[in-house]
Image (cartoon, grey):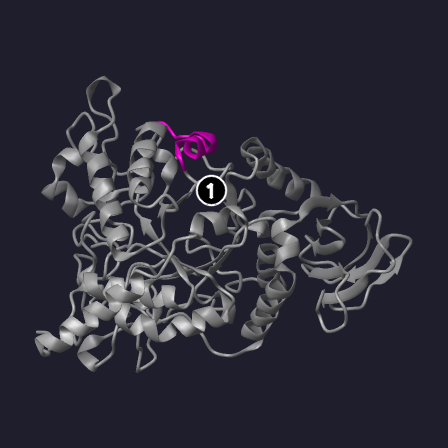
Amino acid sequence: MKKILSALLFTVIIQQSSFASTHWTNDLREKFLAKEAVFYTINMRTFNAQDLNGNDIIEEEYGEKRGTFINAIEKLDYIKSLGVNTIYLLPITKTGKLKALGTAGSLYALDSFDEISPYLDDKDDPRTVEEEAKLFIDEAHKRNLRVVIDIPACGSYDLTLARPTLFLRNKKEDTVIPSDWTDVRLFKIYEERNQVNSELVNAYKSFVDMVQNMGADGIRADVAGIKPYEFWEDVISYARKKDSNFMFIAEISASWKNPIKPWGKFASIEELLDAGFDGFYSNLGEISNIETKKEFAKKFSVDEKILKKYEGRRAVLGTFATHDQISPTHKNSKNYWEQVLWLNLTLPINSYFLDGFPSGDNFDYKFENKKATTTSTDDDFYFLHSGKMDIFNFSRQPLKEDNEYSQSFMEGARFNKFAGEIVSKGKFKKLKTNSDKVFAHMMKYKEDRVIAIINLDKENDIKAKIVVPKLNKKSYFLKIKASDAPKIKRRRIITKLEAGEIQVFVFSKRNKEGKL
């Protein structure tokens, strides 16, 4: 039972929260389309969890606490200090307990469209979990932090029992498991005669109502391509009747294949953008698999081609290390982690950082795939995806300790504050290099330039020569990140790159104090 406070105190708290929210103006679409958004992704269930005995699992019977909206407020100043301006919340809706994965259930096993997970409720706070969520968003807005909330693409097995007409069935009348996502079931997109399932559309609209009533600034749609243009056009237009600046970003990349084949079609990026989505995921994905500059350029050119069609009306989210990907520090060197950091900061994209990335968390958990002592689902094992952020159990918060990674991350944050305008407003140009293993690009805005050079060879150092057209000798040269000082000769940068190293330089009209 929650503690009971006086009605007067409770009224004052709610009034204060409401007062704060009325002074916020949602500008997320504008910031995203200007390539100025810096996303920070958190799993609320673990964000500020208190693991007292250090076994990585949260055991409330021993006085430990899972993450909640209330204790998450304590870390908003930390997020702000990272140079972040947008918080992306992994799903906060109720999760299924039947045929589940993990002891808490996957965040993406959606069990309700309009109910927040009771696991995120602070038991010692008198407010409802909905009021706590609103307070968290209000507090984020006070710090000029925008909030985006994730909606899962499929429903839990529990939801198939509660609302069977929402789900697709095979010839045996069984609900359909999409791809290898064994803990969820595929929604029925169409009624007869290829009419979009109005019940499902209305269910998504109820999710929109919920998050907009909280004060959220946008929605990230999980695996958006498994629903068609007409579905999203209806949902997005509905949301924007209340808030014309409400942002929608589609989880889809140009390199993706249809994950629900043969159960349905997969919408293209262009179809989703035409339906109203503001952006999509970068085609570069895990850059650890890219080995040549031609491959790098080819993948990024796909994004460029799509964006050119929309002339600044759509944008890309950098997704080099998401919660679906293995941590850059799990089996790789710090150089790979730095590639992720600096490509986010130097490419014409919106930056994306996962909670734990600033401190180099490798997402190794001591309890991985061991038998659980207690569980909230029908799974009694601590199911995990090795090396990835845990979205299946009540586990420790990602690392936030001060170390060499966090210090490097803050160097990147300072760079973004100093030179972010050059990147967001500049013109992208790939540069000629003397090695097939070295990719280099430049962002040029007025007379200022940001140049990034990356050695895609993970095993060998390379002496590289990079051609920089029309390089102004009067520009002030800044070595932002490089193991050695380069030589600047005849409009060329000559530098030695360690295996997997990325180097960043600025040629600017700014003076030595960093002022224009």
Q: Provide residue 353's location: percent of width, then percent of height.
A: 48, 60
Using the image, determine if residue 159 lies above or below residue 61.
above
Of the pair 7 and 46, the residue shown nearer to us: 7
User: Is residue 79 visible from the viewing direction of this image?
Assistant: yes
- Which residue position holds label 1? 279
Of the pair 443 and 289, the residue shown nearer to us: 443
Q: Quadrant of the N terminus?
A: bottom left
Where residue 405 sits, quadrant-wise, is bottom right
Residues drawn in magenta: 265-276
Seen in the image, is 98 located left or right of residue 208? Answer: left
Q: How crowded is mark 1: few (under 14 residues within 10 Å), some or many (20 or more)?
A: many
Q: Quadrant of the C terminus?
A: bottom right
Residue at the spot 26% in from the left edge and 71% down from the top edge: 70
Q: Provide residue 504's location: percent of width, then percent of height.
A: 70, 61
Decide whether residue 266 is among the magenta residues. yes
User: Which element carries disc 1, helix, strand or loop?
Assistant: strand
User: Is residue 373 visible from the viewing direction of this image?
Assistant: no
Seen in the image, is 47 located left or right of residue 331? Answer: left
Residue at the spot 57% in from the left edge and 35% down from the top edge: 311
